[in-house]
Image (spheres, helix red, strand yellow):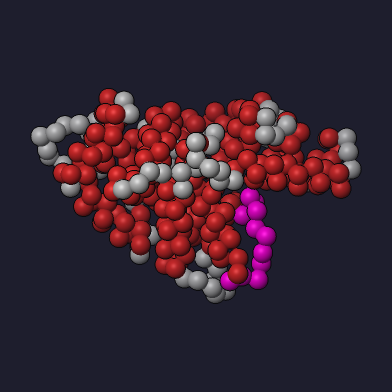
Amino acid sequence: MNTPAFSARTAGGIFSRLDIEWAALCADTTVQATVADWLMADRLADDITSVTDGLADGMTDRLDCRPGPAELLTAIRTGHSQLADAALRALLRRAATDGRSATLAARVVVQTMIPAAVRITRSQVRPFGGRTFDDIASLTVSTLYAVARSGRIHTRSGRPAANLALDTLRYVFAELAADRETRGEDFAAADDLPDPAPGPAELAAAAQVRSAAAAAGLTPAEETETSSARLELLGLVLDAMETGALSPADGRAIAWHHTATVPDLEAAARAGTTVATWQRRRSRAVARLTASLHLRPAA
């Protein structure tokens, strides 16, 4: 789902440094020309210009009026979901190649995902000790960069930003598990991620997901408020149902537990089965969803 405009300076540390570095990249004429060439080649320049005209933070006065990195970032964070997805996929395709172009593309991906990286970092800081915020932030950013360069996200169905966040979250969990007494965090841990203030595009996309989820029986029809983490999970479940990776019953088994908070006893009664059978169904459904999200060789 689209990430609203956000300043990482409020988080400090590595996120502030990334913001400073990004400002320098946006002012670099070589970077401007490179990104402008990408957008022309991908036939995204006109759409991005129409969405970001006058909005991009960091636009510089230049003879070349084609959209550059600042406009691209603004389009992905605040543009229409279809344009944001197309632009992010194009970046991920380039990030999966070799050379300076791939490095720059991955760096742009990281900048677009900083709001999600901040939420992931904050969700993993524990009040009783463990790694510091800065340590986890560095781990999260490096993991996000590696996922962006992996060459798999752009081949996967569903929203690329949600897939990036989910993979990064999963790998950060795995890395930090050895430092903690509590193990086995699953999708429910994403509920700890605080939501940023949504923009108009994100509100519209959220409404579409809620409507589709209610129509599929994943959530109550009257539900009007859902956290971004739950919406991302609902979106992934809906995508998996559409591709056949999950059956409708599988989707309900996951959604009722993780997004609609339906107790197992009530869920089993609705499904006409026992609690034990329902829990086994959910376990298998989560395994199938996870398998569908695993990194696979690039096409």
Residue positioned 50% across, 36% down in the render? 299
Q: Residue 127 placed where, x, y %?
A: 55, 70
Residue 70 falls left or right of residue 259: left
Please say if 135 is above or below 78. Answer: below
Q: Determine the residue positioned at 41% across, 41% down.
A: 92
Which residue range is magenta in the image? 179-189
Most common secondary structure along the magenta stretch: loop
Quick check: 287 above or below 15?
above
Q: Is residue 265 magenta?
A: no
Left or right: where does residue 286 sit relative to residue 281?
A: left
Along the horizontal axis of the image, is 88 left or right of 25?
right
- Quarter-wise, where is residue 290 in the image? top right
Question: Residue visible at 42% across and 36% down?
Answer: 89
On the image, the x and y values in percent for residue 231 come to 57, 39
Residue 184 is inside the magenta segment: yes
18 sits left or right of 211 in the view: left
> In percent of the image, x 29 and y 29: which residue is there?
41
Residue 33 in the image, given as x and y percentages of width and height: 19, 38
